[in-house]
Image: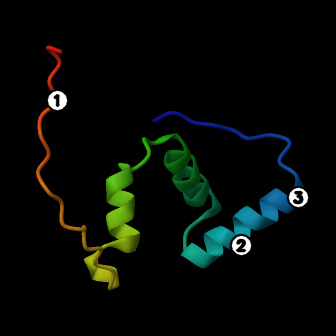
């Protein structure tokens, strides 16, 4: 595993990291690892995000309006 040393971290940021780590019940080092991993990982698929926050499990069931079939386009004209 690689090591990373962070210098010149201001006191406010240090204290915020300490409090965040305590809130999550982990060490400051583990909290920093989690933050960095999340920051550099690929973002979630947007449809997964919508399902997570707006899906049926959250009481939201969006109904699509009825749609009529359409005539296919003719590109030969």
For the residue labelled by badge 3, is the local secondary structure a helix, a strand or a loop? helix
Give the residue number, with chain letter if any, for mark 2.
19
Q: Which residue sits at x=80%, y=40%?
A: 7
Q: Is residue 55 above or below residue 12?
A: below
**Badges 1 and 3: C-beta atoms under 8 Å apart?**
no
Give the residue number, with chain letter if any, for mark 1.
73
For the residue labelled by badge 1, is the local secondary structure a helix, a strand or a loop? loop
Q: Which residue sits at x=63%, y=37%?
A: 4
- Asked whether, in this view, residue 74 is left or right of residue 12, the answer is left
Residue 73: percent from left, percent from top = 16, 29
Q: Which residue sits at x=24%, y=68%?
A: 65
Find the distance from the CA under tag 3 to the CA under tag 2: 12 Å
**Badges 3 and 2: C-beta atoms under 8 Å apart?**
no
Instruction: From the viewer's side, name the closer residue of 16 and 2.
Output: 16
Q: Which residue sits at x=80%, y=66%?
A: 15
Q: Residue furthest top?
A: 76
* Mark 2 or 1, closer to the camera: 1
Residue 25: percent from left, percent from top = 55, 75
Give the residue number, with chain letter if any, for mark 3.
11
Between discs 1 and 3, the one toward the N terminus: 3
Q: Residue furthest front?
A: 77
Between discs 2 and 1, the one toward the N terminus: 2
């Amino acid at each position: 595993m690689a090591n990373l040393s962070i210098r010149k971290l201001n006191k406010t940021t240090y204290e915020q990291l300490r409090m965040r780590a305590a809130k999550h019940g982990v060490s400051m080092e583990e909290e920093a690892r989690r933050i960095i991993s999340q920051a550099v990982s690929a973002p979630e698929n947007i449809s997964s995000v919508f399902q997570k926050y707006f899906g049926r499990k959250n009481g939201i069931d969006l109904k699509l309006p009825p749609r009529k079939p359409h005539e296919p386009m003719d590109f030969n004209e």
